Amino acid sequence: MSGPPPGIDISSGGGPPPGVNTGRGGYVDPNWPFPGGPNDAPVIIYGYTPSFALALLATILFCLYFVAHLFQVVRYRTVYFCTFPIGLAFEIVGYIARCLSAKVNPYNLIFFILQYFFIVTAPVFLAAGIYAILSALIHRLGREYSLLPPKWILWFFITSDVVATITQITGAALIGVKQKKREDPTAANNILLGGLAYQVFAIGLFIILSGVFIFRARRQIKQAGLTLFIAAFSTATLLIYLRTVFRLAETAEGLGGDLSTKEVYFGTLEFLPVVLAVPLLNVWHPGRCVGRSIASDSKEEAGIVELESRG
């Protein structure tokens, strides 16, 4: 992650003149002069002034998805899927902060730090819900079709999620501290990069295990009427994976790289994959389609769930 460009003294609180593109360190919006507040950076760290329309749209959509997912988790009593609404709550906080950046002050470090922290870490919780779905599917369709026992899969990937979460939160928080103090955030960026790299590895391994299981259990999936659910589950998983790969590439470049300083990449590779993945699991909710518990072997419940999934 790059610091400010040569010739700009960020410790003094003064910024470059309006309209100056400062390259990898950010730029100053010619229509938004540097306000010079105590929490303001002398350049816009995003590399652009964020779109208020995009941030507001994201906030509204994730609020709607959050309410729907929370309602479904309660209705179907799917405790194993409760991390999904938590991830959506993170998205909401992140995009509200991005709205404030776009509308109130794009130079403000607090707004930038909040949106960065919550938007980067939110999909970790979404991924945890997706991991739990595979475990529920294994219990529902048959353990003999999985390469590993469902408990091993659940605990390995949940542990991986915890490690990725702690590492990413630590890295994102330290980046915020470094930006607040206007110090070089390279070490903090490397911590975040490590967390994202591990998450990419974990989701990649999960995709392989899921693919093998789905192929082996393809007849049972068809008989149980879960074909559409599996399609939704697979698509959501790949979309979250695409977003994580993008964040890894972006973090490897640093805050001043092309991927982080052009909002079109943020919109198409961060916002769009997540906003498409989430409603798929509203329409085909695991609590309705798969079951209420990831460890239930009850034939009676399985029959009820099968009737509900076809209804």
Image (spheres, helix red, strand yellow):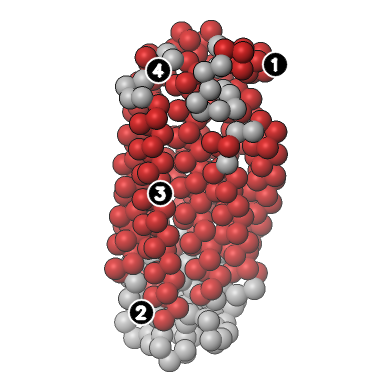
Q: Secondary structure at mark 3?
A: helix
Q: Which mark is residue 294?
A: none
Could you give the CA–CA distance between mark 1 and mark 3, rounded to whole angstroms?
A: 36 Å
Q: Residue at x 64, y 37 (%)?
A: 73
Q: Is residue 61 visible?
A: no
Q: Earlier in the sequence, mark 1 or mark 3?
A: 3
Q: Secondary structure at mark 1?
A: loop
Q: Residues within 10 Å of mark 4 (few under 14, many from 20)?
A: some
The residue beneath circle 1 is: 311
Could you give the CA–CA distance between mark 4 and mark 3, rounded to whole angstroms?
A: 25 Å
Q: Which mark is residue 143?
A: 4
Could you give the CA–CA distance between mark 4 and mark 1, rounded to whole angstroms?
A: 26 Å
Could you give the CA–CA distance between mark 2 and mark 4, rounded to whole angstroms?
A: 52 Å
Q: Residue at x 37, y 14 (%)?
A: 144
Camera-nearest label, 1 or 2: 1
Q: Is residue 164 visible?
A: yes
The residue beneath circle 3 is: 162
Camera-nearest label, 4 or 1: 4
Q: Quadrant of the N terminus?
A: bottom left
Camera-nearest label, 2 or 4: 4
Q: Residues within 10 Å of mark 2 (few under 14, many from 20)?
A: some
The residue beneath circle 2 is: 183
Q: Quadrant of residue 174?
A: bottom left
Question: Which amino acid, mark 4?
Answer: Arg
Q: Is residue 89 above or below residue 155?
A: below
Q: Quadrant of the C terminus?
A: top right
Q: Is residue 284 above or below residue 239?
A: above
Do residues under tags 2 and 4 come within 8 Å of each other at their CB atoms? no
Q: Residues within 10 Å of mark 3 (few under 14, many from 20)?
A: some
Question: Which amino acid, mark 2?
Answer: Glu
Across and down, in percent, residue 168 comes to 39, 57
